[in-house]
Amino acid sequence: MSATPQKNRTPRRVLAAAAGLATVGALVAAMPAGAHDRGNGHGHGHGHGHKPRTVDVQLLSFNDLHGNLEPPAGSAGNVSETQPDGTVKAIPAGGVEYLATSLRTARKGSPYSVTAAGGDMVGASPLLSGLFHDEPTIEALNKLKLDVSAVGNHEFDEGATELARLQNGGCHPVEGCYEKGKKFKGADFPYLAANVTKEKTGKPLLKPYTVWKKNGVKIGFIGVTLEGTPDIVTANGVKGLKFHDEVETINKYARELDRKGVKSIVALIHEGGAPASTSYNYDCDSPGAGDGISGPIVDIAKGITPKVDALVTGHTHQAYVCTVPDPAGKPRMVTSASSFGKLYTDTTLTYDLRTKDIVRTSVKSANHVVTRDQPKAADMTSLIERWNKLAAPIANRPQGWISADINGRGSTAPEKPLGNVIADAQLEGLAPADKGGAEIAFMNPGGIRADLVYKASGSEGDGVVTYGEAFTVQPFTNMMNVVDLTGAQLVTALQQQVSGPNEASPKILQVSKGLTYTLDLTKTGAARVVTDSIKLNGAAIDPARTYRVAMNEFLAGGGDGFPALGQGTNKLVGASDLDLFNAYLAAHSTAAAPLAPPATDRITVVQ
């Protein structure tokens, strides 16, 4: 999910202001159902006394962790499971205390087990990780014994220098070390970025691949992020970097690994697809291979050389285990494990000791729920407690009160209740003439990272919104911009929600009160936006008139496929999105009169 990335603006990120940005996204590779009770896993023999020809390698994977060390709150913390009778049940899942237990349990009885991630381990993280530039998440991943991860787009939120620090260690250049006498040691696992090079030298930014070895078994891992990363990360985050085609890059390094005698190869790709069902146990190979999945990963999978044996993917926060034919027409496993540590994939790779390759027909894979009814991993509990103690003075400050859940990330509707609150907060804060004179505010849906949940997360009491909870919703601390746009540019921007790069997977902007229009999903492309229905406070938008429009700096730069929004003039830079959100909560709620979820009546949807 593309999200508003945070600027590389560390000096502003004083602890007192608690304006953090973190990048945590983890996609770990897949494993089949029952992999942990498959016997001793020592391979398949052919009669007595013969050395086994094959051994089973267990590949555990996950993706898009986004620094969610604690269980995600509200609907964002559920996975959907289709029951035998066809009904769908929501199961609370996630949290590294449970993810650690799940992975450790799965590894039992598997002498050959490797754990991989599909990117976005960090970034857009809750306050517990984001406040500390995601050091807590890297520490947790080290304890999880993660072997390798691809970079995701969010690994670039704070720029290449900060990504290098997460890999190599060292205290933050501005904020220093967070714990007295302790220096951040960096990731024990390699971050792979095969398709990211430095503009000046043309050399890879990080390692393009790594080879996992055990008892003569060798598996190569190639890691890439989506080529479109610069479109969904602020300019400062990708400054000096070039992003290359995923397929060409993977094929290039697969040839290199093959020449080096590494015949078993897994690609970790921070790009994904959309299954036809949101249930994690949906069979996306029904009726045929890969029939139930769409999106960018399908064409990527079809283009990657048959030398690659399995694809671990991410970015779309979806759950799927599919086979998509490779260029030779043979089925190949493509997996994704939702997000926030709610699932892990268990994939069995049968390794032929003679050919040193994977027996592709034997590859089995399944997603498993990281349930919260299993024991917590004690080392993760103590890690969370340690960092929570450091974050508490900032995190626990009350910001406002709500009367019920206000869904954002957990809402699948085009218009989200929390999106309306955020857009209204931005309009209200930037409407005064000296603050920009905004008449309209737009919020990109990917920048809403959580729900506001009524139930207390700690000791603050039900209905209280703490600074930590507000930060989890808006973790990028993007500065707000107010710009001039013509009515014609506004109409074009609304059309870009459902056309161009956003046609296959629409990005519906959240709009401030007073702006109304109809979205006709029975049409295609730009025609889905009914032009003559677009009104501001009941009056039709005038194509020739100039309007003052508020949005975060990411959207104002044309991010997320909205070039029209990048055409604004007379820019005024305002407060951060988080500051406006907190100010709105304080102004519109009290313990006696909490903020209620707003009506969602701004966008009329025709389906």
Image (cartoon, rainbow, N blue to C red):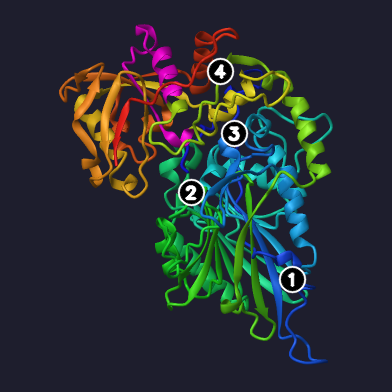
Q: Secondary structure at mark 1?
A: loop
| Tag 2–tag 4 contact (CB < 8 Å) | no
Q: CA distance from mark 2 to mark 4?
A: 30 Å
Q: Residues within 10 Å of mark 3 (few under 14, many from 20)?
A: some
| Tag 4–tag 1 contact (CB < 8 Å) | no
| Tag 1–tag 2 contact (CB < 8 Å) | no
- Give the percent coordinates (x, y) of residue 53: 71, 86
Q: Residues within 10 Å of mark 2 (few under 14, many from 20)?
A: many
- Which of the two discs, 2 and 4, labels the residue nearer the N terminus? 2
Q: Amino acid at mark 2?
A: Thr
Residue drawn at x 42%, y 24% as measured from the top left: 420
- Give the percent coordinates (x, y) of residue 160: 56, 43
Figure check: 220 above or below 426: below
Q: CA distance from mark 1 to mark 3?
A: 35 Å
Residue, disc 3: 74
Q: Amino acid at mark 4?
A: Ile
Q: Amino acid at mark 1?
A: Arg
Q: Residues within 10 Å of mark 1 (few under 14, many from 20)?
A: few
Residue, disc 1: 38
Residue, disc 4: 402
Residue, disc 2: 316
Q: Residue 83 sits in which quadrant? A: bottom right
Write down the region rendered in magenta. Answer: 420-447
Q: Secondary structure at mark 2?
A: loop
- Which of the two discs, 4 and 1, labels the residue nearer the N terminus? 1
Q: Is residue 305 magenta?
A: no
Q: Residues within 10 Å of mark 4 (few under 14, many from 20)?
A: many
